Amino acid sequence: MARHASGMQTKSSASLSKAQPPKMNKRLALLALTLALVAAGPLVDGFRPPAVPLIVFDPYMNIWSTSDKLYDSWPNIWYGQTKGMSGAIRVDGRTYRFMGSSPDFPNTAEQTSVKVQPTTTIYTFNAGPVELTLKFISPTIPTDLELLAQPITYITFRVKSTDGHSHQVEIYYDQSGEFVTHKPDVDITWDRGNVGSLIYARMGTQAQTLFKPVGDAVGINWGHAYVAVPSSDARVSVNSDATSRQSFAQSGTIPKEDDGRKPRRANDQWPVIAARWSFNVGAADSTTKYLIFAYDDVFSLSWFSTPFPAYWKKSFNSTDALLNNAQKQMNNYISQTERLDKVVMSQTLSAGGSQYSTIASLAWRQTFGATKLVWNTQKEELWYFLKEISSNGDFNTVDVLFPAIPLLLWANPNLAELILLPHLSYAANEAPIRYGLEWAPHQLGVYPVADVTPQAQEQMPVEESGDLLLIIEWLAKTNATEYTSRIYPRYKDTIDQWANYLISGYNSPQNQGPSEEGSDLPGDAGQASSTEDCRNQCLNNPNCAAWGFDTCGSGKCWFKGTNTATTPNNCRTSGYFEGKLVLPDPGYQLCTDDFLGPIPHNVNLASKGIIAVDAYADFLIAMNRKDEAQNFKTVAKSFADHWVSQGFEKDHYKLQYDLPDSYSLQYNLVFQKFLKIETFDKTILENEAKYYFNHHWNRYGAPLSSQTEAQPEHFTKLDWLAWSGTLTSDATLAAHYWEAIYLFAHETPSRVPLSDWYRTHDARQQGFQARPVVGGFYAWMLVQEGANAKLQFP
C-alpha cells in the first residue's frame, strides 16, 4: 500500500474488500501462514520490549529493566525508582558485567539476545570464551492458585564453553536494600538463616510499619526479601556494595562474614545481599546455577483495619517452609513454566500470528504482577486483589479489572470470580462502612488499604455496574455451577440491584436540554467546589433527581426540587441540566476514560449498559428465574433501538448521541461477542472495526475518539484498541490492529513497562504504565472457536 511521508498507510473500504480472497483460499492461506510462523518460532525475533520483566509477581515486587542491554542501567520498580541488582561473571580471571551499571565491573559481556515469554525472561551473553544464559522465572501459572500465590522468582545461570576448552568460572549476584524500602533513607537490617539444603540472607526495614505509605508510586516498607542458594556450592553474605563487588572483581570471592554495622540507612554505603558461585565448565559441557528470590510481606493488605495475609501462608507456616518447598519443587515448577509458556505462545500464535503472540507474552506477567491472592481471615476464604498501577493506585478499581478481565477469563475464570468477591461483599454492606448506593462501587480504597467510604468513590454508576454484571453474566453463561457458586445466590440481592439500576430509566423522561434550564431549580442552593463535585453530591444523595452548578464563581450547587426559581442560563454550567437517568442515555456520567472528563450522552458507555441488561435476561434464565427474564429482554430491545437510531451517523457510530461529525472506538460492543449474544447486529461490530482502520489509522493505530484525534497527541488506549480489533471476525483485518500495537511496543521511545495510553503518530507514552489492563489484549483469544477459546493447560 502507498505510504505518505508521515509513514501512515492509505486504504479504503473498497480496496480492503477487494483484497479478501475467497473463503476456502483464505483458510488455506491462513493455515500456510500459521505453519510458517510455527516453523519460525512464536515470538518475533529481535523484538525490543519497552521494558523487560525481571522479578514481577505482585504490585511491590515489580522490577524491570528499561534498557536495551541489561548492563546499561540499574533495574527499577515499575515507576522508575532504582532497585539495585548487579551481576557479573568471571572467566579465567577476567570479569564481565552482565547486569546493572556498577563501575566496579567496568568490562561488560556482550548481550546477544533477550526474549520475554509469559513466565520467563531469557537473556544470552557472550563473556569471552563462554556463553551465559540468564533466566528470570516467576511461576505465574493461573491454573494452580497455590503456586500462583507463592512470592518467588527463580534466577538461573547456565554457562557453556564456546571455544572447545574448559574454563574456571565464578558468578556474582547482588541486590540492594532498595528492595525493602520505599525510599533509601530508611533504616534496614539483615540476618542469615538456613533451611534444608539452602542457605539464605534476608533483609528488611528496622521499623516494619505495615501498610505505610499507601499510594500509587510507592514501594514496600515492611516484610523481608530473601536470597537463597544451595549450601553445597554457593556463598551468600551482606556487605556494602563496594566491598562485595570489589572483592569479586579482584579475586572472584565475596566476604565470608556480614557487615555488622546495622541497622543503617539503605543508602549508607549501600548494603547488598551478595551471592557467589565458583565452578569449572568442561569443554563440551554446560553448568547451571540458581538462586531463589522470595519476599515475605507478613500481611499483604488491610481490609477495613483487619490485616489479611497472602494466600501462600495457608500452605506454609513460615518463609523457611516456603523456601524449602521452592527448592524441592524447583525442577517441577520450572518444568511447568516451560510447558505453560509453550502452550500460551502456541495458542496465541495460531490465533493471531507472531506479532500477536509477542505482545501477549509481554502482557502476561504485567497483568498478573498487579494482583495478589489473599486469605480473608474473617470469612475463611480466598480473595483476589488488584492495584490500579500508575493511574492513582486505587484498590481493585472496577474499570481497571474490567479491561484486564479477558486474560483471567481465558486463563482461569475462577480468578475472575475471586476478584469480584471483595466488591460484592463491600456493596452488600458486609464491611464496617455501609455502602448503601444502588450501583456498583468504583474501588475499595488506595492499595493496600481498603477503607473507602461511598462518598469518597469516583462515581461511575453505569460503567461499574455494567462492568461487574457483564463479568458475572459471562461466568454464569460459561459454567453456572462451577463459576458462580461463590457469588450466587449469596449476593443475589446486590446483583439484582445493579441490574435494576440499569433499567431504572425505562419509561422515564429524558434529561432536559439547555433550552429548558433555569425553570425548576430550588431557591436555596448548596455549595460545591466544581461541576464534578456538584454532580457527585447529587449522585450520593438518594433524594436528588438532578443537579445544576453555577459557573459564575459563587460555587452554588442546586438539586432539583419542588420549589421553583429561575437562574440565568449563563450562570449555570453549560450543556445539560442532568437528571440521574441511566439508559439508554447515561447523561453526564463518567466512564473508564475519565482522563477525558465526563463525556455527555456517551454512546460507547451506553452500549455497555445495554448489553449488560440484555445478558441479564439470559443470566436470570440460567438461574431458574425465567419469569423475570422477559422484562429485561424487552427493555434491552427498546434501549438497543434507541442506541442504533440516535447513535448512528453515515457509516459509523458517534462519540455522543448529540455530537455530529464525531466517532469513538466502540470497544464495549465486544462483550456481546464474549457472551455470544446479539444485542446489536453483528454487522455493526464488523463495520466499526473497518471504519477505524479505513478512516482514522495512524502507524500505531486509531485514536481513541474524534475528541483525542483533534488533540496534537492523537492518543489511544492499547486495551481498547485491542478490543476494537476483536470486533471483527476477519483475521486479516484484526492483524492490522496487532501490528499497530506491536510496532508501538517495539518502537516507542518511552522506556517504561508497557503503557496502555500512547500517541498513535509517534508512539510516545501519553500516560500510564505497567497497568494490568494490558490483559485486555487477550480479548481476541476469548472469541476464538474450539481449543483456542481457553487456555489448554495443564
Image: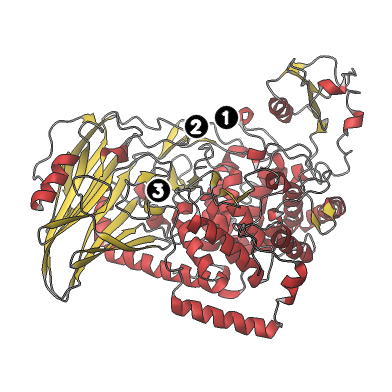
Q: Are marks 3 and 1 in contact (CB under 8 Å)?
A: no
Numbered disc 3: secondary structure = helix
Q: CA distance from mark 3 to mark 1?
A: 25 Å
Q: Quadrant of residue 557?
A: top right
Q: Is residue 451 left or right of residue 551?
A: left
Q: Position of residue 31 (x, y in %)?
A: 57, 82
Q: Are marks 2 and 1 in contact (CB under 8 Å)?
A: yes
For residue 782, say whether it is visible: no
Q: Where does label 2 land, which residue? A: 304
Identify the disc placed on residue 433: 1
* 340 lies above or below 94: below
How many numbered circles are shown?
A: 3
Residue at left 36%, top 57%? 138
Quadrant in the picture for the N terminus = bottom right
Q: CA distance from mark 2 to mark 3?
A: 18 Å
Q: Earlier in the sequence, mark 2 or mark 3?
A: 2
Q: Position of residue 652 (x, y in %)?
A: 79, 57
Q: Is residue 233 left or right of residue 431?
A: left
